[in-house]
Amino acid sequence: MAYRGGSFPLTSGLLLCAVLRTVQADVGVALRIEDIAGDDWRLAGIVVDIGSAEADRLEFALRVESLVLPDELGELRELAFRCGQAQHDETGWHCHEGMLTVASSPWQAQQTPWSGSWLNDGRLQLSIPRLSLARGTVAVELDAAQPDWQAGVTANRLQVKPLSQLAAALRPPKGWTGDGRVSGRIVLAGRAADLNKADVDVVVDGLAYASDDGTQAGEGIVIKLDGNAKRRSGAWQFDSRIRWPKGEIYSEPLHVDATRSALTVDASGRFDAAAGRIGFDSWSVDLDKTLRISGTGTLETGNWRFSDPTVAAHSDAAQRLYDVLVQPFLIGTPADELQVDGHVGFVLHYDAKGV
């Protein structure tokens, strides 16, 4: 059999559900699907085997010869979920000691335990506590009660360098070098095929990078990202914060040490992909004890142009502001070593008439 679109999950789910609810001793069922394909992904050679030698006990295996991932991420070969002894009780079916294997993938082969449950009310639970990825580990949890679902991914010390090779969007500019570690958790939730909610809590530590021309560099950097987004009326409402509490960066001629001037970036607003527009209810960039810039406005993603922005800046430490952000551009000029004092502040609003 071959399938296109979403008919396979429904068909196979109904078949498997019927088998599980009626399984008795000495039962064996095998199902083979030749092909399932979406717009940019494909499953081939799917085999489901279910066998039972006694009531309320069964063993099963789901094997996939090939899984072509979307977005040109590569192909998984010989993927298999196996459970040697699934047990049935008054709540449903449970596999406490399953095994997941992948013979080859764009990252590395896998052999790791999994557990899961298929409950009488149709709820599906799956846990894979340890997948090897980018010299670190990833845990995956899935909880689905049709039509709603939630998936969580927890990363532990993924290495930035091998991680950047997984997708083109993660790769640094040509000639740049860098490394570091990524840890944290991402939780996604939705209904049917729609993603409706996302929560992110990620830390990048030990980050170091350098450009090939020597004008850009960083070392010992720690970055913390917290954010959430909810889809409402076709657009995404988001609230995010990026913190840089540790490390040093050099961007010729600037040099900033986060231990002296930690950076915090906050943004909240609404992203409408269909309209190509990000509306910022508020945003701010706070360089601790040095300068705070905040504002509102709309970013047109088609041409990356701000419209109707308001920008406010304030500093209570004019000397520190001069030392960190101004003096590096004045080296070798008469203003190289100025002594300044006081406060700095302004508010600008741009509209169709200008400032």
Image (tube, rainbow, N blue to C red):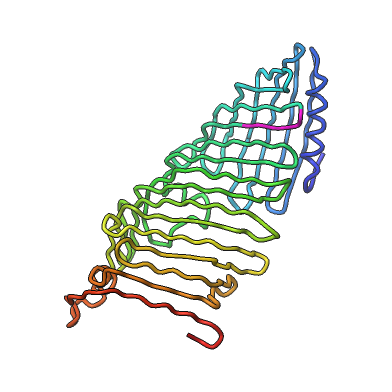
Image quadrant where residue 344 sits: bottom left
Q: Which is nearer the eye, 154 or 280? A: 280
> In this rendering, would 164 be left or right of 60?
left
Image quadrant where residue 54 sits: top right
* Spot occupied by residue 347 in the image (x, y as percentages of width and height): 42, 77
Q: Which is nearer the eye, 145 or 101? A: 145
Give the answer, above or below, for where 147 lies relative to 96.
below
Residue at point 43%, 56% (across, down) = 242
* Spot occupied by residue 307 in the image (x, y as percentages of width and height): 55, 77
Image quadrant where residue 209 sits: bottom left
Give the answer, above or below, for where 247 lies relative to 83.
below
* Spot occupied by residue 263 in the image (x, y as percentages of width and height): 36, 59
> In this rendering, would 84 be left or right of 280?
right
Residue at point 58%, 68% (across, down) = 279
Is residue 123 shown in magenta? yes
Give the answer, above or below, for where 72 lies relative to 34.
below
Residue at point 72%, 18% (across, down) = 88
Q: Which residues are magenta?
A: 121-126
* Spot occupied by residue 6 in the image (x, y as percentages of width and height): 78, 45
Give the answer, above or below, for where 128 lies relative to 332.
above
